[in-house]
């Protein structure tokens, strides 16, 4: 099957400026040489701790942040250098859902205006009645109903607002949605509703998701494949089940063991990582994980490990594994 | 661990109080008054914490966990808050009747707090060492020196404490800041540490470090702890007993082990089923339908009835009490031990959990 999305060697470096004349002192390598592929209707989970670059990667792919280097191909077309109306036309094919359902909806617009704006921009409705009908359908698709169209965002709960955000993304019939922590701001009992909704929509409409989250259990549940990032780099990429059952990279192993388990009888051994995530301005030489790694060897401190395929479909960047 | 579990079991029943509880909250009610309206955020909460015991308060946002915990040292501004009834007995004395001098003494002296956002709780313009020293000056002036600050920083696992005490909060990472907060809370040698979502703002690997630290500290210092969380996984890691709150009331109270292996209240069951777990089969999550009720608009009767798979016709009309249904297991539900209702009896016949369990039932 052809890939829907192909990202090659993507880099996003932010300059760090200092002093009177804002001289560039260095770069934060938020995303450093990341490549990935996404098939139609597939969910790729993106996990990592805060500051690892997962959000930046998601935004750079849909050109909300300009990449420093590398390329993004969507449906076979290079969108890395598209601009203006051309880029806007392509944006119909990929949308985004944001973390904060409170901050990502304009409080002065009704739900109808919020969803209708996308329909208007891409001229997807021929008449006003067609537009209204379409909005009603979208609201129904996300579990709301047509009477909600005239209300304002503050009249809804967090979960309902996230549904509005999803309806807005669906309005333009995208092939891919970048979901940036879509459930982490929601109450626990409501998270499952949104996860189920996203899965239903994927089955009905064949949408591919790039699902960014820090909660490994959620990511494993919804994703087909999972990519683990550390300090702007991919450390491991595999099928979701493989990542959870046979993690190879020591960072993935530690991350998994840190997830609290509900079952009190579970005798999982926890690997507690010493220290914190290093600053991405001054990443350690060699493997970025080496100061915290329990398996560290000499060459880890000097050579950057390459991402290699150790088993079919299972990629790891580690010298020791 | 086994010993302490046995201890807990023995001391839960009020008539067998071999050791007096450190904290005993009895029928606490708290209202927020605005104009002529009074919104009841906490409605009849009772539980006890014994010396050395860790109790978890679990529930979603807006269910009164934090204000219950803050009430222990009377940290909820009043007005707008008022306490129409109830007692908070800390070492046998009612906090709700204390005067300002007495309150000053127990704040820090008996009960210390750590909060969710360490960066918001630390003063950004003072070095962390001097902030910890301030806590020492108030409670243990005889040791308000750098040596004691270093000892505390070492206790909470901060490397090179001699250097770190000269740092400002912004120079530390979130996990380190939370360690400083814990050191500050421990400076006064409290008997009860209240931790309000202490790891929610932290990354998973750092969260594991902090939970390990808290568990280690309470054992070494023989402290009691009240931990507030919405994460059931953390409960299994650290708690002796758990109280699950829904809409201002405790709906289930049990030992952590019992509650996590066999939850009895439909809300607790639904909450546990709605959370995805690592390496479980890819079945569909059983979401709890509906939304979390807002303060002031709590449903009548049993407050969980609009979302409950076990709800029956009379649930909106009768108010259930928290009852000890099995030894040391308290549940607020009329039908906790009844099978799922038939379509005629069911209050929410379209509840997805109900439909699914009926399917499984008829399927097998």
Image: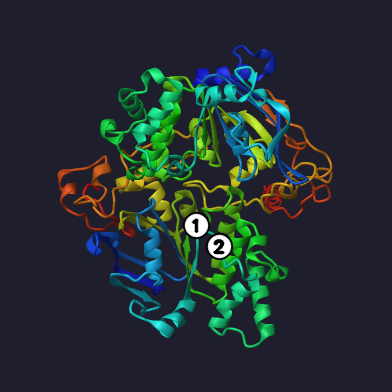
Residue at 65% in and 30% down: B253
**For this rendering, which residue is in front, B360 or A301?**
A301
Q: Is residue A79 left or right of residue B4?
A: left
Label 2 with label 1: CB-CB less than 8 Å: yes
Vertical position of residue B282 compared to residue B88: above or below: below
Vertical position of residue B245 compared to residue B354: above or below: above
Q: Let me know if marks 2 and 1 both belong to one chain.
A: yes
Q: Earlier in the sequence, mark 2 or mark 1?
A: 2
Q: Is residue B125 left or right of residue A197?
A: left
Residue at 58% in and 64% down: A200
**According to the image, label 1 marks what residue?**
A222
Q: Chain of mark 1?
A: A
**According to the image, label 2 marks what residue?**
A198
**For this rendering, which residue is in front, A192 or A84?**
A84
What crowding class fits label 2: few (fewer than 14 Cα within 10 Å), some (14-19), or many (20 or more)? some
What crowding class fits label 1: few (fewer than 14 Cα within 10 Å), some (14-19), or many (20 or more)? many
**For this rendering, which residue is in front, A55 or A242?**
A55
Image position, residue B48 (x, y; %): 63, 24
Quarter of the image for residue A123 reads bottom right
Vertical position of residue A173 compared to residue B350: above or below: below
Vertical position of residue B313 compared to residue A85: above or below: above
Quarter of the image for residue B176 reads top left
Q: Is residue B261 visible?
A: no
Image position, residue B208 (x, y; %): 41, 38
């Amino acid at each position: 099957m052809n890939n829907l999305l192909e990202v090659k060697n993507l880099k996003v470096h932010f300059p760090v400026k200092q002093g009177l004349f804002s001289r560039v002192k260095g770069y934060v390598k938020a995303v450093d040489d990341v490549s990935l592929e996404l098939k139609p209707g597939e969910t790729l989970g993106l996990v990592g701790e805060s500051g690892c670059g997962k959000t930046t990667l998601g935004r750079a792919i849909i050109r909300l942040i300009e990449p420093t280097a590398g390329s993004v191909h969507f449906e076979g077309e290079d969108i890395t250098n598209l601009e203006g109306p051309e880029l806007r036309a392509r944006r119909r094919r990929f949308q985004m859902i944001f973390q904060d359902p409170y901050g990502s909806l304009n409080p002065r617009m009704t739900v109808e205006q919020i969803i209708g704006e996308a329909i208007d921009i891409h001229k997807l409705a021929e008449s006003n009645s067609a537009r209204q009908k379409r909005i009603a359908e979208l609201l129904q698709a996300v579990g709301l109903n047509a009477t909600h169209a005239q209300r304002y965002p503050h009249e809804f709960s967090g979960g309902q607002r996230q549904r509005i955000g999803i309806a807005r993304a669906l309005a333009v019939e995208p092939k891919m949605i970048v979901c940036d922590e879509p459930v982490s701001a929601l109450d626990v009992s409501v998270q499952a509703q949104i996860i189920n909704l996203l899965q239903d929509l994927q089955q009905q409409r064949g949408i591919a998701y790039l699902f960014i989250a820090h909660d490994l259990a959620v990511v494993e549940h919804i994703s087909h494949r999972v990519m683990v990032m550390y300090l702007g780099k991919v450390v491991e990429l595999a099928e979701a089940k493989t990542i959870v059952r046979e993690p190879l990279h020591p960072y993935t192993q530690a991350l998994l063991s840190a997830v609290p388990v509900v079952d009190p009888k579970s005798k999982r051994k926890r690997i507690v990582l010493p220290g914190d995530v290093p600053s991405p301005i001054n990443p350690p030489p060699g493997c970025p994980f080496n100061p915290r790694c329990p398996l560290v060897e000499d060459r880890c401190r000097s050579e950057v490990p390459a991402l290699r395929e150790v088993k079919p479909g299972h990629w790891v960047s580690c010298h020791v594994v | 661990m086994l010993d302490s579990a046995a201890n807990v079991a023995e001391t839960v029943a009020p008539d067998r109080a071999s050791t007096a509880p450190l904290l005993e909250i009895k029928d606490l009610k708290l209202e927020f008054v605005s104009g002529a309206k009074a919104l009841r955020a906490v409605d009849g909460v009772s539980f006890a914490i014994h010396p050395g015991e860790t109790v978890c308060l679990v529930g979603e946002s807006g269910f009164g966990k934090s204000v219950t915990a803050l009430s222990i040292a009377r940290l909820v501004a009043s007005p707008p808050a008022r306490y129409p009834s109830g007692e908070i007995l800390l070492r046998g004395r009612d906090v709700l009747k204390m005067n300002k001098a007495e309150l000053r003494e127990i704040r820090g002296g008996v009960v210390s707090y750590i909060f969710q956002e360490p960066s918001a709780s630390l003063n950004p313009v003072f070095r962390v060492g001097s902030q910890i020293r301030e806590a020492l000056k108030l409670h243990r002036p005889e040791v308000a020196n750098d040596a004691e600050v270093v000892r505390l920083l070492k206790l909470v696992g901060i490397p090179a404490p001699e250097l770190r005490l000269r740092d400002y909060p912004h120079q530390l990472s979130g996990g380190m800041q939370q360690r400083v907060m814990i050191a500050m809370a421990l400076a006064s040698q409290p008997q009860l540490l209240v931790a309000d979502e202490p790891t929610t703002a932290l990354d998973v690997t750092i969260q594991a470090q902090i939970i390990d630290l808290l568990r280690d500290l309470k054992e070494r210092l023989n402290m009691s702890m009240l931990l507030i969380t919405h994460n059931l996984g953390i409960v299994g890691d650290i708690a002796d007993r758990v109280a699950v709150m829904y809409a201002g009331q405790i709906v289930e109270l049990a030992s952590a082990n019992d509650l996590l292996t066999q939850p009895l209240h439909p809300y607790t069951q639904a909450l546990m089923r709605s959370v995805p777990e690592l390496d479980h089969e890819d079945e569909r999550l059983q979401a709890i339908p509906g939304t979390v009720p807002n303060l002031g608009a709590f449903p009548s009767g049993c407050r969980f009835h609009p979302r409950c798979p076990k709800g029956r016709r009379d649930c909106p009309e009768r108010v259930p009490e928290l009852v000890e249904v099995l030894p040391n297991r308290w549940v607020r539900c009329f039908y906790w031990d009844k099978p799922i209702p038939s379509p005629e009896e069911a209050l929410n016949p379209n509840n997805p959990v109900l439909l699914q369990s009926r399917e499984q039932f008829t399927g097998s």
